[in-house]
Structures are given as structure tokens and as C-alpha cells.
Image: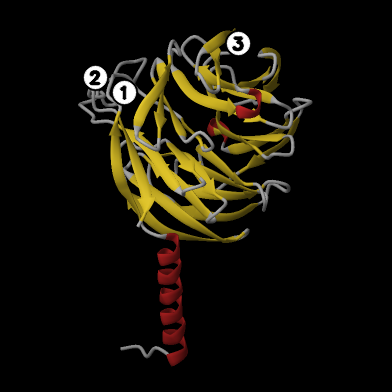
Amino acid sequence: MKCVSRGAVTWLVASVMAWASLASAAGAFKVDRRILLGGEGGWDYLTMDVPGQRLFVSHGTHVQVVDTRNDRVVGDIPNTLGVHGVALAPELGRGFTSNGRDSTVSVFDYKSLAVSSQIKLDARNPDAIAYDPVSRRVFTFNGGSGNASAIDAPSARLVGSVPLDGKPEFAVADGKGAMFVNIEDSSCVVAFDARTLRVLHRWPIAPGEEPSGLAMDRKHRRLFSGCSNQKLVVLDADQGAVVATLPIGKGVDAVAFDPNRNLIFSSNGEGTLTVIHEDSPDKYTVVENATTERGARTMALDAGSGTVYVVTADFGPAPAPTEERPHPRPTIQPGTFRVLVLKRR
């Protein structure tokens, strides 16, 4: 039997106590309640309107809007074929949806949700969508054409595009006029100027592979990329250096950052929510892998209350593989689509 020094034991006990203290401070996230939305079809991004306490939920051909104060559906944005995401520009009184199936953007009123126009893109399959308040532009990130389309938000007119040379996923604005976007098929992050549309940087994120979710700590200039090989990569947003790599659950799609509590979240399709604490800009600790439900891989965060929202449904068997779809997804059971509300306990 090997001897263990008293110093090593003391260090181990101190480490365990420190982790326990951190976990207690962060709180354990649990499903507080479920909001049944029903209907049919798939889903993608969630967007939280914190001032209005509304959750925008993309749902196949429309967007359902939930008042999170009473869990009621208070609005619906129709005719958004193959909708992926929603971008809000509250100071302009507008919102925008990215409609992948017909490559359009729907423009709607921020308060009434009434659609005022549709913009036809010169691009294919707009997926992620993000608003940059500095340039007052909305960007769609087009999976079918490997670029980003720039829309002037006040006039709702196309003003240009940005070549990304790959399949873009989530994107985030830094609040200073730069946009960052994950490029899934080349495992990198691209930074570009939202005003000039000039590509500034293209940074690899190895050991991360096939990044999807992206969030940012704007104060400390850190990017958080959720990758398909169960890693969250922390990137310096000025130098492009990888400063940390953390383990996350399987099947990540979305990533969020809570600046009020210094917490990073990864929503994983396996049915977990990985919670990571930012101890410092270059040091991070995995706090827990909270239980959600299978398929709950997209997410929105209310940074005011610290509440996390994910969505999923019940699944049936996958259809038989075809040449066009060699890896078909499981079928979605009609009427089971729901929001899971996670809170700290």
C-alpha cells in the first residue's frame, strides 16, 4: 500500500471543498416546469426578449411567442417556412426571422408581432440570424451558400454579403462593431467588421471540431464555442488563441453565457445541460451536467433571472435511410412539442 502525504491529503480535501462550494454557489439546475406548445414540425433557435419577458420559439413554419411570466402563448408569427431563428432590434421596434426553406427574412413589429415585409435573399438556407446594434444591421448566416447576408435594419434592405468559405452556424456580436461566427465544416471562427463587411480573422479552434453554439463574455473578450466532439473551446476574441478547453455533453447545439453569474451553458441533445463557471477569463470549472430531456439541444437564457429555456418533443422511430438522407432523424410525435424551464435550486 502506497503512503499518501499529509500535504497531498490536505490539498485533495481543499480541492473537493472548493468544488463543492463552487457548485453550491452556482446552484443545481433542475427542470422547474414544462410548457406544452403542441403542434407539429421541427424547431431550431430560441430567442429570449428579456425586457418584454417573451420567449420566441421557432417551430417549423411559424414562430410561437410565449409570455414567460404566465407561460401563455401570446403571439404567433406565421408563414416563416423552415424558420431557424429570430433576431430582435427593440430600439428600432423590429424583429427578423430567418426562413430557410424559401430563403427569406420576415420583418415584424417588435410589440404587435405583425409582419410588415419579407426580404428575398440572394443566398440559400439562411440559418443563424443576429443583430449588431453598432452598425444597426441584421446578418443571416446562410448554410446553403457559405456566406452571410447583411440587412440594414431601419430600412429592411439588403446592403451586401460576407464570404465565409464554409458552413456557418451560431454567431454573436461583440458590441463594438465586430461579428463572430462558427464555421462548422472547417472547425474555425471567422470575425468580420459589421460596417465594412470585411473579414478580419479566421481562427482554428482545435482541439474543438464542428462547432455549432457560440456565446461571448464581452467584458473579458472571450468566445465560447460548443463543438460536436464534446468540447467547449474558449477563445481570446482579440488574439484568436485557445485559452481553455472544457468537456461538455453529447449533441451540443446552443451555448449561452450569463454575465451576471459568470456561467456558461451548453445544451446537449443527449438530455443534459452542461454548466461551467468562469473562475477568471482564463480559468473555468465544470459545475454540473444537469438533466433535461432527449433532444433538448437548443436554448435561450434569461440573464436577468438566470433561467434557462430548452425545447424538445417525444420521438418515434427514424424513417428508413435513403441516398439523399442516409442518417434520417427520428420522427417527432405530434402534439408533444414543449418548453422546459430550468432554474437553480
Is disc 2 in contact with disc 1, using a CB cutoff of under 8 Å? yes
Q: Which mark is residue 328?
A: 1
Label 2 Cα crowd, 10 Å radius (few <14 / some 14-19 / many 20+):
few
At x 47%, y 55%, the residue is 276
Of the two numbered discs 2 and 3 on the same chain, state the one appearing first in sequence.
3
- Horizontal side of residue 252 vs 189, given as left or right: left
The mark closer to the camera, 3 or 1, is: 3
Q: CA distance from mark 2 to mark 3?
A: 33 Å
Label 2: state its secondary structure: loop
Q: Would residue 312 be visible to someone looking at this image? A: yes
Is disc 3 in contact with disc 1, using a CB cutoff of under 8 Å? no
Label 1 Cα crowd, 10 Å radius (few <14 / some 14-19 / many 20+):
few
Residue 184: % across, % down: 53, 33
- Residue type, numbered disc 3: Leu
Residue that numbered label 3 is attached to: 121
Q: Which mark is residue 111?
A: none
Label 1: state its secondary structure: loop
Counting labels gives: 3
- Residue type, numbered disc 2: Ala
Residue 116: % across, % down: 56, 10
- Residue type, numbered disc 1: Pro
Which is nearer the eye, 23 or 185? 23
Residue that numbered label 2 is attached to: 320
Figure quadrant of residue 192: top right
Label 3 Cα crowd, 10 Å radius (few <14 / some 14-19 / many 20+):
many
Residue 338: % across, % down: 30, 32
At x 32%, y 19%, the residue is 41
Whether 238 is drawn above or below 100: the answer is below
Which is nearer the eye, 273 or 52? 52
Q: CA distance from mark 2 to mark 1?
A: 7 Å
